[in-house]
Image (spheres, coloured by chain):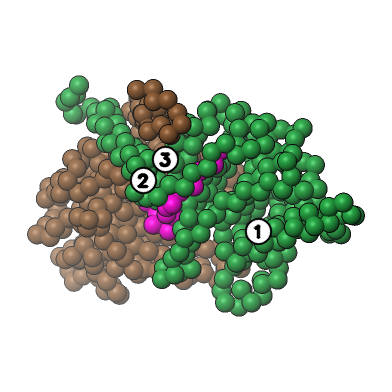
Chain colours: A green, B brown
Amino acid sequence: MTYCLAFLLDAGLVFASDSRTNAGVDYISSYSKMHVFKPAPDRIFVIMAAGNLGTTQAVLNRIRRDIDEHQAAAGGPPPEQEGAPDLIQARYLFEVADYIGNLSVGVQRNYRHSLQEAGATGEASFILGGQIAGQPHGLYLIYPQGNAIMATQETPFLQIGESKYGKPPLDYIGHHGMTLEDAARLCLVSQVVTRRSNLTVGPPFEVAMIPRDTLEMSRRMRLQKDSMLITRTMEIWARSMQDTLARLPRFGWEEDPL
Amino acid sequence: MTYCLAFLLDAGLVFASDSRTNAGVDYISSYSKMHVFKPAPDRIFVIMAAGNLGTTQAVLNRIRRDIDEHQAAAGGPPPEQEGAPDLIQARYLFEVADYIGNLSVGVQRNYRHSLQEAGATGEASFILGGQIAGQPHGLYLIYPQGNAIMATQETPFLQIGESKYGKPPLDYIGHHGMTLEDAARLCLVSQVVTRRSNLTVGPPFEVAMIPRDTLEMSRRMRLQKDSMLITRTMEIWARSMQDTLARLPRFGWEEDPL
């Protein structure tokens, strides 16, 4: 399984992902699920992927090939491409979401019959965030069917993969006005909490930040399970829950200890 | 959807359930999912149900009928019954779990074809807790397939229904040695957190406690959404998350505010 999430903030974008991949319980490995693309100086994109690893890797390989071919043809006529404009041609972020959705549906179609025969699915979901110069920064969730939804001020975070365990802290305290650093801390809490309840989500955890209108990634971290930041975050969060339980209201028949 | 959970404690048993039932988004109603049976002075059982409401109600109706017939036949020969002994006959709690599992599978079988044709499923899960005099108190989760697992000291809680959102607090601070009241508070936190992230789980929340070796339910509560206990619990939990976020370790490039 996988758990990736991202925040759309007034201050920019924050991304977080785990690195656990498993095909059954006896083939567990570690893959980065966070991919940064800066195909031209006027744009930056982060793509995170969950679902069938074959599909997500095939989609990312095609994205890279399209960029290569596009750059190789620089000066000459642009390479012929079907469908939505790629990461270099796109003028709007939603066009990049459509492009990724198209690639994903195409790859899934290639293997659908053979996967169905094996009782498996090639489905994959993606989170796309980034900015193109002159456009606002944005964040999209691309479904396995190729369509996409975007984050808004009211719904500032998006999740893919094993998203339920880590959602309550986001619902309670996540908002569009957070600093990049606070949102990154909240993302790590959400990852750590998920990891505690579901071992198919696991470190290293990756975090990246893109401040608004900079078109650059300002920070990128890869945090191991035993890193000071992760162990302290886990300790403080667990201790806080314990302390809070002791502060909750007593029932009518109990003596109030306070 | 539904969310029920229960704790097996050294001190006894604690049960908690929501009351939201929905068939689609336009037929939402409120049903109690917590059912207490005291069919004889030497035993007490609590049964909570999740899944297809037709199945769970049919199972509970059959349980009640078997008790009625059994009690009506008191003095005469016991009524003929197939399969596992019922709530009055059982000498062990696991026999009651088997009995409920058998009933559930039987009911599901009756409607399987017609439900499949409608693209629906009759699956249901149950939590059974209780005690029979002379036996230890215990807690079982009965799967839709009729088999069951039991809670242990190491795994003291069981959940059915929408179980992921509310699991992290249980994983972090739930343990076999809690008081009945602390476990009840933790169950309410788990319910409230789930409710915040998924509107198909909803109040009133019900809570029940059975102290060990008493064969009696010591407390039963039905808490409305606007009850002081629920609103205060939500406030304190949310505030605590907010405060804890501010106490988490800073990143290397930030000034430490402490």
Q: Image check: A169 left or right of A82?
A: left
Identity of the residue drawn at 23% across and 43% down: B209
Which of the two marks, 3 or 1, is nearer to us in this view?
1
- Give whichever of discs 2 and 1 has the lower sequence position: 1
Q: Specify the segment rendered in magenta.
A: A197-209
Specify the quadrant that holds the C terminus of chain B.
top left
Q: Subunit of mark 3?
A: A
Q: Subunit of mark 2?
A: A
Identify the element where label 3 is drawn: helix
* Both marks 3 and 2 on one chain: yes
Q: Which mark is residue A227?
A: 2
Residue located farthest toward the left when viewing the structure as drawn: B134
Determine if residue B234 is in view: no
Q: Image check: A45 left or right of B99?
A: right
Residue linked to disc 3: A189
Specify the quadrant of the image occupied by residue B232.
top left
Alpha-carbon span between mark 2 and mark 1? 29 Å
Would residue A199 be counted in the magenta stretch?
Answer: yes
Determine if residue B258 is in view: yes
Crowding at dot 1, Cα within 10 Å, few <14 / some 14-19 / many 20+, comes out as some
Specify the quadrant of the image occupied by residue A14.
top right
Residue linked to disc 1: A60
| Residue B248 drawn at (x, y percent) | 37, 32
Foreground pick, B75 / B142: B142
